[in-house]
Amino acid sequence: AAPAQEAVEYEIVKFHAGPLNNEPDDIYSGPPSPVVDQAWRELYEFGAIHVTPDIASKLANNTEKMYKETEAIVGIDVFHQLHCLNKIRKALSLDYYAREVTESKEVHAAHINHCLNSVRQSLQCGADISTVPFNVQQLKFSSHPILVPTFNVIHTCRNFRKLQEWTRYRWTGELIDGE
């Protein structure tokens, strides 16, 4: 029993494809900047939530109470996955983010590897079966039209904003990245 199940609502979403389909970058892509960093942080800033002992006892994965808390604490996995994806994004621009890396090289590498594997497992678990059509397009970086996958397609998604609001209401105040 997932405590957030009550927040699940589905919606139709058209994905943003970006430059590979002649669209501009969105706020989450493009070169590193404070604006891009803030947009990413706002996706997953709610680290852990409180759940009642009754709900905690019904979870598939055991969780414990901290200190003298009366409620247990759990995280919602999508926010961990977004933290991991952001960690990988930053690792791709280490020149810009080097000052943020406070872990040893070994711990940083282990964290990145954990994140890659965690995101992989999450993608496989969710296994989105939306179709990706192929179309002939003239791309900015190609001298002639080519057959390319078109990624700005319709998906049936869980309403992410609704889940964020549900989580925000139950948030413990702990931040995933400690920011």
Image: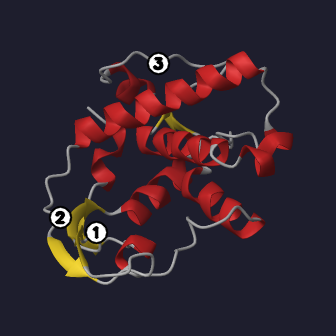
Reply above or below: 174 against 109.
below
Residue 114: image x %, image y %?
51, 24
Q: Residue at x 51, y 32 (%)?
A: 115
Cα distance between the residues tagged 1 and 2:
6 Å
Specify the amino acid type for callout 1. Phe
Q: Which residue is mark 1?
A: 151
Q: Nearer the viewer, residue 131 or 53?
A: 131
Reading the chain from its start, which is encountered first: label 1 or label 2? 2
Q: Nearer the viewer, residue 19 or 33?
A: 19
State yes or no: discs 3 and 2 in contact (Cβ < 8 Å): no
Residue 123: image x %, image y %?
30, 41
Please tell me the numbered disc located at residue 69.
none
Q: Which residue is mark 3?
A: 63
**How busy is the neighbourhood of tag 1: few (under 14 within 10 Å), some, or many (20 plus)?**
some
Specify the amino acid type for callout 3. Thr
Residue 88: image x %, image y %?
57, 41
Q: Which residue is mark 2?
A: 132
Is residue 48 found left or right of 131 in the rendered image? right
Residue 41: image x %, image y %?
64, 55
> From this viewpoint, is residue 73 visible?
no
Q: Find numbered disc 3 in the image and state the secondary structure of the residue it sits on.
A: loop
Reading the chain from its start, which is encountered first: label 3 or label 2? 3
State yes or no: discs 1 and 2 in contact (Cβ < 8 Å): yes
Which is closer to the viewer, label 3 or label 2? 2
> From this viewpoint, is residue 82 visible?
yes
Reply above or below: 21 against 127.
below
Q: Find numbered disc 2 in the image and state the secondary structure of the residue it sits on.
A: loop
